[in-house]
Amino acid sequence: MSAVFRLLSRRLFVLLAVINLLSFNVFFVSCAVQRSLEEARQERQRLVQKYIKTLNKEEGAIRLVGGENEYEGNIEVLHNNKWGAICDDEWDALEGRVVCQQLGYPGLRRVTQDGYFGLARRRYWMDNMYCEGNERELTDCHFDGWGINDCEANEAAGVICESPHLERNTETPLAKLLPKFTLPHAYRIELRLRGGRRANEGRVEVRIDGGRWGTICSDGWSLLEANVVCRQLGLGFARDALQTDFFGGLDIAPAVLSGTECYGNETTLAQCLHHDHLRPPAECHGDRNHVAVVVCDHLAPDLVVDFYELERTAHLEDRPMALMQCAMEENCVANEAYDIQRDDPNWRYVTRRLLKFTASTLNAGNTDFRPFKEKHLWEWHMCHMHYHSMEVFATFDVFDLLGNKVAQGHKASFCLEDNQCLSGVPKKYNCANFGDQGISVNCSDIYLYNLDCQWVDITELDTGSYVLKISVNPEFKVAEMSYDNNAAVCNLLYTETYARVDDCRLARP
């Protein structure tokens, strides 16, 4: 009897174990199904949240266009029920982070300029964006005003955000994300210009190691790359760098190189970075018929920042906001000042701490520095009672010792004139009375420290050691002989009672 009982007990134990195992499996499968359903719900909610403003055509909605994936592309913003592009003037990681956050992506990989994902498809709605990086939406940032811009179609701003499915992303890397290399020394690279009206202009054609002649993809093509081409061909300096098929495009000569990226002082295009030319075909984005084009010239300006004047004139000033209303209209103070103006009824009596200095820029080239905008496009500024010819001629930035930007000056635009010339050189350019603007050879444009916006608002900055960087022609929009002397990089010591700028050296923007 006891043996039978033991046998039954053993079988009952095994049965219970099987039941428990089945129950566990059912529970596990149920949890897995529940978890996958929950993930699906979260994904749907994320997509709805991301696109709800776009679907409803709400003011300020943004979207990315031209990219291979949903998380990359040129940016378009909705205003007055019409989509428009954003210009890449002053476009950097602060603005890019706001875009990726507004669209619901995990983060920013990098920002893009120069129509990286193709030419702007519509009008430009926003230019000279200025974000602190913590805004909820792009329209919370400062900019020049809806539709106010000086941008060509190839100046569209874009972003590449972090993918929301990084662990599931098994796609082949796109050409634009591929690594870049210089051409090996063993390779012989030849250049020529074709299709131009004169010998100094045309589409750039290249032949590598005796292979076939072909064009260069225009993605990111700028004056930096064009300068190298003109130098290698013995044609002087680049006057224009274009992305066009005006001189013939890919339908005439297929692309040989893509992803071309130069520092600007290379002696040959082989020293620049490119995608692997042994992996044809070259991957061109945007309008596939557009190629790299240059116009060369032996005459070019060359701006040099006078850092001695910068060191001599730098000082602090505490100024009440009542005396800064004109400057505030031109976004010349930090975002916190506008919050104070909105929330504090006594904002006029609040002071801002300004780091002020004189910026003097000499033209040491062999021809005049002229604004790239035609005269009829210059803007009248009521506060200053004269026309401004360049929106971004100079930038003023303060960095911490780790290289993070912690403060920046912001001037709406600039008037260029001959304030001081070397002995025997007559002044040619004057802002008054709608006069011509520019900087003559051996003359200097001088923005004195007592002028509006000739400062950096450092009110919220902690005392300590920093780096001050003053740059002219920072976006390389106007052709020059060299950009290596367009910036002054200085040590900045900021205390409660004074600021000292010293140990300046010339650099590129």
Image (cartoon, helix red, strand yellow):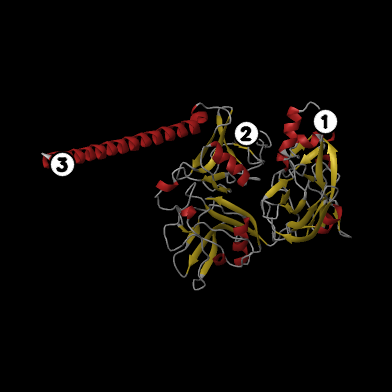
Comparing 321 with 289, the one in front is: 321
Query: What amino acid is labelled 3 in the image?
Result: Arg
User: Which residue is at a point 83% across and 56% down the rendered structure image?
Assistant: 311
Q: Which residue is mark 3?
A: 6
Furthest-right residue in this view: 423
Q: Residues within 10 Å of mark 2 (few under 14, many from 20)?
A: some
Q: Secondary structure at mark 3?
A: helix
Q: Compared to 501, does 356 lie above or below?
A: above
- In terms of secondary structure, where does tag 2 sit? helix
Instruction: Name the residue located 54 percent from the left edge and 42 percent from the top edge.
Output: 74
Percent from the top left, x then y, of residue 77? Answer: 57, 34
Q: Is residue 472 above or below residue 86?
A: below
Q: Nearer the viewer, mark 2 or mark 1?
A: 1
Q: Quadrant of the N terminus?
A: top left
Q: Looking at the image, is mark 2 or mark 3 nearer the viewer?
A: 3
Q: Quadrant of the C terminus?
A: bottom right
Could you tell which of marks 2 and 1 lies nearer the N-terminus?
Answer: 2
Q: Quadrant of residue 197?
A: bottom right
* N-term mark: 2 or 3: 3
Residue denoted by label 2: 139
> Of the residues shown, which amino acid type is indicated by label 2?
Thr
List x then y, in percent, for residue 112.
Answer: 56, 48
Residue closest to the eye, 315 or 480: 315
337, 251: nearer the viewer: 337
Provide the residue designation for mark 1: 348
Residue 338 to residue 120: above or below: above
* Image quadrant assignment for residue 481: bottom right
376 left or right, relative to 425: left
Instruction: Please state the horizontal and vertical placement of residue 244, each as a whole percent of the image.
Output: 54, 50
